[in-house]
Image: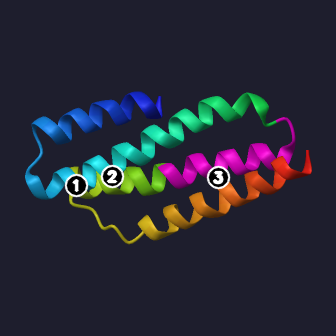
Amino acid sequence: MLAALAVALSAYAAHVADPAGQSRLQTAAMYAFGHGIALAALAPLARRALGRYALIAVLIGTLVFAGGLACAYFFRTSTALLPYGGSLMILAWLVYAIDALRR
């Protein structure tokens, strides 16, 4: 789902958005696409609770970060929560790596 939304967002950015918004929307699309593909690939492998929680945190962080960028463009909302989304993604990937090393 994230990957499909990312492709649509990227197309909108390329064909409709003003130059200032293109950068934000392309960044949102890039993070949503990459994390969507990663989640689809890794979800079946997350057999332990820690790995599943880490992937849920990746999803939430992606929604906050990429979704926040898109909302800032479309609805002129604040970007104040974006650092939390990005930090959550970083922390979640570290937790997932720790869980993977423990396997």
The extreme right residue here reads 103
- Residue at (48% x, 41% y) in the render: 34
Q: Is residue 23 shown left or right of residue 80?
A: left
Q: Say which element carries label 3.
A: helix
Q: Position of residue 71 (x, y in %)?
A: 29, 53
Q: Residues within 10 Å of mark 1 (few under 14, many from 20)?
A: some
**Residue 50: in magenta span:** yes
In the rendered structure, which amino acid carries the disc numbered 2? Thr
Magenta stretch, overall SS:
helix
Q: Which mark is residue 27?
A: 2
Q: Position of residue 26 (x, y in %)?
A: 28, 47
Marking on residue 57:
3
- Badge 3 amino acid: Ala
The reply to whether discs 2 and 1 touch (Cβ–Cβ < 8 Å) is yes
Relative to 43, is 85 above or below?
below
State the SS at label 2: helix
Distance Cα–Cα, label 3 vs label 1? 25 Å
* Residue 27 horizontal/vertical position (percent): 33, 52
The residue lying at 85 percent from left, 45 percent from top is 49
- Whole-percent x, y for residue 44 in the image: 74, 28
